[in-house]
Image (cartoon, grey):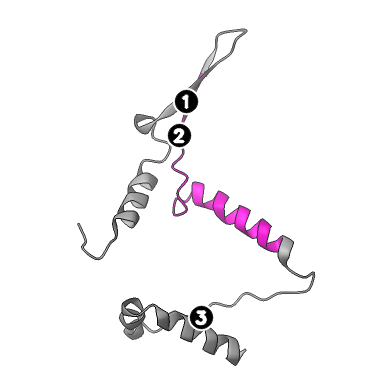
Amino acid sequence: MNPNLSQYKIDEVEKMLHCRDPKYGFLTYKCSECSATKTVPLACKSRICPQCGKKHADLWADELVGRLYAVPHRHMVFTMPEELRALFEADQSLFKVLMDAVSNTL
């Protein structure tokens, strides 16, 4: 086990790996008229899951669109040099300083 990973991160990856695997839970539905059954494996509902996370992202995007003004928007991505990543991980308050600097620059 990687000592740099929190238990939360490990648990989320474990959930994702078992998503929709009937060995980890399922629901069975039975028709009251014809007695046909259908088994549905349970989803993990993790934000990092390629299937379940998309639902979270879509809901977030829909909610965000409802709060935005009806004007053109631009999406920008700021990257950080690999050499600085350890510094920001060690002192996460630097992220606020960085975002304030980006905001002032724009």
The residue depicted at 67 percent of the width and 62 percent of the height is: 64
Say which of 63 and 74 sits in front: 63
| Residue 78 badge | 3
**Label 1 element class:** strand
Would you identify the image quadrant in which residue 30 lies? top right
Q: Residues at badges 2 and 1 in contact (C-beta under 8 Å)?
A: yes
Q: Give the mark nearest the N terminus, 2 or 3.
A: 2
Residue 14 locus on image (x, y percent): 33, 47
Residue 27: numbered disc: 1
Q: Position of residue 17 (x, y in %)?
A: 35, 45
Residue at the extreme bottom of the image, as rendered: 105
Front residue of 93 and 68:
93
Q: Quadrant of the N terminus?
A: bottom left
> In the orientation shown, which residue stands out farthest toward the top?
34
Residue 28 in the image: state x and y as whole percent: 48, 21
Query: Along the polypeptide, which appears first: circle 2 or circle 1?
Result: 1
In-front residue for pair 78/69: 69
Who's the residue at 41% across and 41% down the image?
Answer: 19
Three-letter residue code for mark 3: Phe
Residue 42, disc? 2
* Residue type of the residue flagged with mark 1: Leu
Q: Which residues are magenta?
A: 38-65
Of marks 1 and 3, which one's residue comes earlier in the chain? 1
Judged from the image, the secondary structure of the residue bearing numbered disc 2 is loop
Q: Quadrant of the C terminus?
A: bottom right
Q: CA distance from mark 1 to mark 3?
A: 43 Å
Residue at horizontal 73 percent and vertical 60 percent from the top: 66
